């Protein structure tokens, strides 16, 4: 359970838990995308698919060009749940994918490994890249779940539809979904800041 919520690290021989958070500031979401694009197009694509689809990193890394090229809907079978998922591709993501896939073979992974031929980037490398992006912007609580949580946070803030977000995430409990995207913590933080004794 803890691995879903954060990353366990060793510090002075003790195991500590770093909780992974969404990127709440929309300008920062864009800035991190731009930073990743400067590093590598494949990291940018990984990030864009993550923040626009809410897919888990394990499913993003399995995507091949044939799965996304010229598609207005992407169909996958989730690795974790085994459930089939179909999601529409919005215009911004469609344009980015179309441009990126030009000249690439259908069998290529959209986020290829830099070391192994015809293989996807590893989860560990994906984590390292997102973590570095966070550190570049002074955010020390980013990880691969950040992309999914960022999608969920901004989707909820725009729609206020927790039931629809639950369906997208395949969750069965509203409070779990709100806790997952950091809404509960945001609400607690705001309430604590406003609290006063008269």
Image (tube, rainbow, N blue to C red):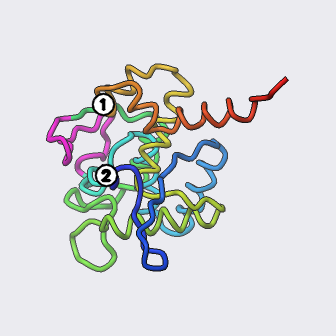
Q: Position of residue 5 (x, y in %)?
A: 39, 50
Q: What residue lies at 35% left-to-right and 55% top-to-bottom? A: 101
Quick check: marks 1 and 2 in contact, CB under 8 Å? no
Q: In screen coordinates, is 84 left or right of 90? A: left
Q: Position of residue 57 (x, y in %)?
A: 33, 53
Looking at the image, is 181 positioned above or below residue 100? above
Q: Residues within 10 Å of mark 2 (few under 14, many from 20)?
A: many
Which residue is the site of mark 2?
60
Residue sitting farthest toward the right:
198
Q: Position of residue 123 (x, y in %)?
A: 32, 64
In front here: 125 or 140?
140
Q: Position of residue 55 (x, y in %)?
A: 34, 44
Regarding mark 2 in the picture, which secondary structure is present there? helix
In front here: 164 or 60?
164
| Count of marks overlaid on the render | 2
Q: What residue lies at 48% left-to-right and 59% top-to-bottom? A: 18
Q: What residue lies at 74% left-to-right and 35% top-to-bottom? A: 193
Would residue 80 be counted in the magenta stretch? yes
Which residue is the site of mark 1?
171
Q: Residues within 10 Å of mark 1 (few under 14, many from 20)?
A: some
Looking at the image, is 13 positioned above or below residue 193? below
Magenta segment range? 66-84
Quadrant (top left, top right, bottom left, bottom right) of the C terminus: top right
Q: Quadrant of residue 38?
A: bottom right
In front here: 154 or 186?
186
Q: What residue lies at 34% left-to-right and 68% top-to-bottom? A: 124
Residue sitting farthest toward the front:
197
Earlier in the chain: of badge 1 and badge 2, it is 2
Regarding mark 1 in the picture, which secondary structure is present there? loop
Q: Nearer the viewer, mark 1 or mark 2?
A: 1
């Amino acid at each position: 359970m803890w691995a879903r919520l954060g990353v366990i690290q060793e510090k002075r021989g003790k195991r500590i838990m770093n909780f992974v958070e969404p990127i709440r500031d929309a300008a920062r979401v864009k800035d991190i995308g731009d930073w990743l694009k400067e590093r590598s197009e494949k990291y940018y694509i990984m990030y864009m698919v993550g923040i626009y689809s809410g897919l888990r990193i394990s499913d993003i890394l399995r995507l091949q060009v044939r799965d996304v090229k010229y598609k207005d809907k992407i169909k996958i079978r989730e690795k974790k749940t085994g459930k089939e998922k179909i999601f529409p591709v919005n215009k911004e993501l469609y344009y980015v994918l179309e441009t990126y896939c030009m000249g690439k073979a259908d069998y290529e992974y959209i986020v290829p490994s830099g070391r192994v031929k015809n293989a996807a980037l590893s989860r560990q490398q994906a984590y390292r890249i997102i973590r570095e992006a966070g550190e570049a912007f002074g955010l020390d609580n980013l990880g691969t779940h950040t992309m999914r949580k960022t999608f969920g946070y901004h989707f909820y803030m725009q729609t206020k539809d927790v039931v629809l977000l639950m369906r997208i995430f395949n969750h069965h409990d509203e409070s779990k979904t709100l806790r997952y995207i950091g809404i509960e913590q945001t609400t607690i933080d705001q309430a604590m800041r406003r609290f006063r004794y008269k």
